[in-house]
Image (cartoon, rainbow, N blue to C red):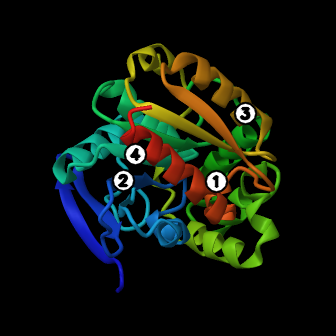
């Protein structure tokens, strides 16, 4: 059965959602990484057939509303909370930037979510990869000087930074990612709210009640490993799991291995561990 694709009208505009045939298990809300969209979760969904999966396209991504100059990560997190409330979802799964959005959602509503599964999230004001920071600045300069065009996707997909280094080892996966990035709208490059900055999120995380699993590829960028350890210490109920032979996008690079980690974490949560 094909995915169901539908919109939810949030207070800030329409959000696109993708949902495969629903399983009988818990309902999970999946939040993709920067310049990606929820269609790339499909291998994970196939590897976890017993759950009810819903993928959200963040604003400015996929089929969701455009980003506005007023938007910040906090607005993205509020949209995730609103969608979760509307669909009665208590469990979030986020990848990279999507994991950061999930963290912010948990910071805004510390007792709202039961379980969080976060693969390589960044922490605003926390450890930063210099190559990625330089690339983000270059993307802004390119957008300012040349406008929106294929040169932005070409630059973002280069290594360094090592965001896509692991995915490039699988030509089929990288082709899917490149096609998704190639269709990205890049509105955020003109929005000052998306410049990295301290938000105080790390202090708010001490109140989060969710059971948290932090996932890292064993070949991920060093700054994300440092962030995971910082989060493990800051979050009251957090553990770290490593995925062998994986880089920054471990859930996309090693879906079967990550699916096992997800299933185990959800089962532990059901047992109240």
> Is there CB contact under 8 Å for labels 4 and 2?
yes
- Structural distance between the alpha carbons of marks 3 and 4: 20 Å
In the rendered view, tell whether residue 200 sits above or below residue 93: above
- Looking at the image, which is closer to me, 5 or 54? 54
Give the residue pinned by disc 2: 29
> Residue 110 is drawn in which quadrant?
top left
Relative to 4, 261 lies left or right: right
Residue 220 pos. (x, y %): 76, 45
> Is there CB contact under 8 Å for labels 1 and 3?
no
Q: Is residue 73 visible?
A: yes
> Please, what secondary structure does the residue beneath circle 2 have?
strand
> Please, what secondary structure does the residue beneath circle 4 have?
strand
Q: Is residue 191 visible?
A: no
Q: Earlier in the sequence, mark 1 or mark 3?
A: 1
Give the residue pinned by disc 4: 92
> Please, what secondary structure does the residue beneath circle 1 have?
helix
Q: Earlier in the sequence, mark 2 or mark 1?
A: 2
Relative to 205, 227 lies left or right: right
- Structural distance between the alpha carbons of marks 4 and 2: 5 Å
For this orientation, the residue located farthest to the front is: 271
Q: Earlier in the sequence, mark 1 or mark 4?
A: 4
Give the residue pinned by disc 3: 225
Give the residue pinned by disc 1: 145
- Structural distance between the alpha carbons of marks 3 and 2: 24 Å
Q: Earlier in the sequence, mark 4 or mark 2?
A: 2
- Structural distance between the alpha carbons of marks 1 and 4: 38 Å
In the rendered view, tell whether residue 77 sits above or below residue 200: below
Residue 15 pos. (x, y %): 28, 58
> Residue 225 is drawn in which quadrant?
top right
Identified at 50% across, 71% down, the residue is 42
In the rendered view, tell whether residue 125 sits above or below residue 115: above
């Amino acid at each position: 059965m094909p995915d169901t694709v539908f919109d939810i009208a949030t207070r800030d505009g329409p959000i696109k959602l993708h949902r495969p045939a629903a399983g009988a298990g818990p309902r999970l809300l999946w939040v993709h990484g920067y310049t990606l969209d929820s269609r790339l979760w499909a291998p994970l969904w196939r590897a976890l057939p017993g759950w009810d999966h819903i993928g959200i396209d963040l604003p400015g991504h996929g089929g969701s509303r455009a980003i506005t100059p007023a938007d910040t990560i906090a607005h993205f997190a509020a949209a995730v909370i609103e969608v979760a409330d509307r669909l009665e979802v208590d469990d979030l799964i986020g990848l990279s930037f999507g994991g950061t959005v999930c963290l912010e959602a948990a910071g805004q509503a510390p007792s709202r979510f039961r379980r969080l599964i976060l693969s390589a999230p960044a922490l605003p004001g926390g450890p930063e990869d210099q190559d990625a920071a330089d690339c983000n600045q270059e993307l802004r300069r390119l957008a300012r000087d040349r406008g929106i065009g294929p040169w932005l996707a070409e630059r973002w997909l280069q290594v360094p930074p090592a965001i896509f280094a692991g995915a490039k080892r699988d030509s089929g996966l990288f082709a899917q990612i490149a096609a998704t990035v190639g269709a990205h709208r890049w509105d955020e490059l003109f929005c000052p709210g998306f410049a990295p900055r301290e938000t105080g999120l790390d202090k708010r995380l001490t109140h989060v009640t969710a059971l948290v699993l932090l996932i890292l590829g064993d070949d991920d960028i060093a700054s994300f490993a440092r962030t995971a350890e910082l989060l493990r210490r800051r979050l009251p109920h957090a553990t770290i799991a490593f995925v062998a032979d994986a880089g920054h996008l471990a859930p996309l690079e090693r879906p079967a291995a990550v699916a096992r980690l997800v299933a185990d974490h959800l089962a532990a949560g059901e047992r109240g561990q």
